[in-house]
Image (spheres, rainbow, N blue to C red):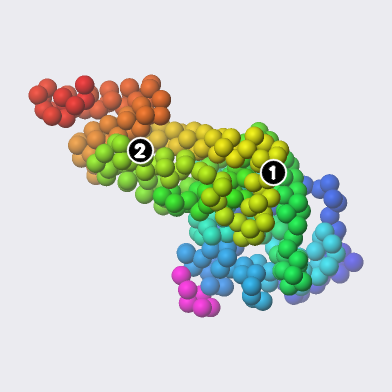
Amino acid sequence: LMHCNEVIEKLFGYSFFYPKRNKHEIEQGVSVFYLQNIFTQEVAEYTNKSNNNTSKKTIYDIEDLSSETSLIRAKGASVLCTKDGKMGASYVDCLRGKDHVGPANVMLSYSWGNTVEDIVDVLESYCSRNNLNPRQTYVWICCLCVNQHRVLEDKKNGKNIPFEDFRDVFKNRVKEIKNIVALLSPWREPLYLKRVWCIFELFTADDYKCKLSIQMPKRETEDLKRSIYNSRSGVKINNEIYNALAGTEIEKAEASVDSDRINILNIVNKEGNGVTELDKRVNALLREWIHTSLVEFMHELDDVVVNLQSSEKSVDEVIDTYRYLGYMFYKNEHNKMALYCFNKQRVLCEANYNFFHDLTARSY
């Protein structure tokens, strides 16, 4: 049977049969290399049929469960599922070769409202920052790893997948993989922090002591830096950043199925210490990430100072930015970093202006 399957695959480019998976086998993930080089091309071809802008396509756009046509379901339409043996497999079940698929070692926590471009960008950055080989970094991402054929069948039959089933799948993936990448975008109004499932995932990852990496697409990171550079007030930029990124309130978050939202809030209240405690823990995680991001930006600013003559930034811009960073560190009780920034500001003022200059005076 397996030999026949290989022949079919070579002749027709797809497979009718895959060996049924052992229930204890680690879930499969899609490699970052595959997402970079093949999945993005498939999305481009799929969306170009309607002459739409590929870069702005979200998961909802390519996997519309209210439509019979879809990029993700089409992949496994003629393939038997490895879990239930029925026709119609998940996307990941259709992939072959160790460069494309393998035991999941990363779980992506995201919203279906995120663009494909941002998802791939964040995973590329994650590999780069952690010196990981994209061919061996296998991502469990629900749209590709959950069988959407079964989700649609249940929907047609008027049956929503029970909340407990979704929760068990998610909880098992978190416990099994223990390595979560959370996608935050756009930074001014993150979709992630508006979805109750996403906030709950972040909370659960922390609860199970998982390795948690919060990532923004490069475009959003650069926009955040520009906003700090161009700010005219440390108070204003501090409030803008922390209100947007560390002001989570799970009770205001939404879910595609309202009963999921109610169930999650019930779990938080019954099994945890209530929504207030969850908000505190999630916001503490986000504040820690903001602090790390600001420290990285501070070091980049140090590099700008070294090469100031060839930099596009003026001395005044750099001085002001050190002051804004210093204020943000101070307001959030990172006094050592605040003092470092204020000292850098003072040294630059003394080197470029006299002691009676307004900027120099304000640096003391």
Residue at the disc numbered 1 = 267
Does the rendering let one see residue 340? Answer: yes
Residue 224 painted magenta: no
The main secondary structure of the magenta stretch is loop
Q: Quadrant of residue 172?
A: top right
> Residue at image x 80%, y 64%?
81
- Discs 2/1, front: 1
Q: Position of residue 306 (x, y in %)?
A: 28, 32
Does the rendering let one see residue 135? Answer: no
> Residue at image x 47%, y 64%?
55
Type of amino acid at the residue the image marks with label 2: Asn
Type of amino acid at the residue the image marks with label 1: Ile
Q: Position of residue 169 (x, y in %)?
A: 74, 50
**Number of the label disc, if any, that sits on residue 238:** 2
Labels 2 and 1: the sequence-earlier one: 2
Q: Position of residue 320 (x, y in %)?
A: 24, 35
> Residue at image x 82%, y 59%?
83
SS under mark 1? helix
Image quadrant where one finds the N terminus: bottom right
- Magenta stretch bounds: 48-53
Vertical position of residue 66 compared to residue 359: above or below:
below
SS under mark 2? helix
Q: CA distance from mark 2 to mark 1?
A: 33 Å
Q: Quadrant of residue 323?
A: top left
Residue 49 painted magenta: yes
In the foreground, 31 or 212: 212
> Are the residues at dot 2 and dot 1 in contact (C-beta closer than 8 Å)?
no
In the foreground, 330 or 9: 330
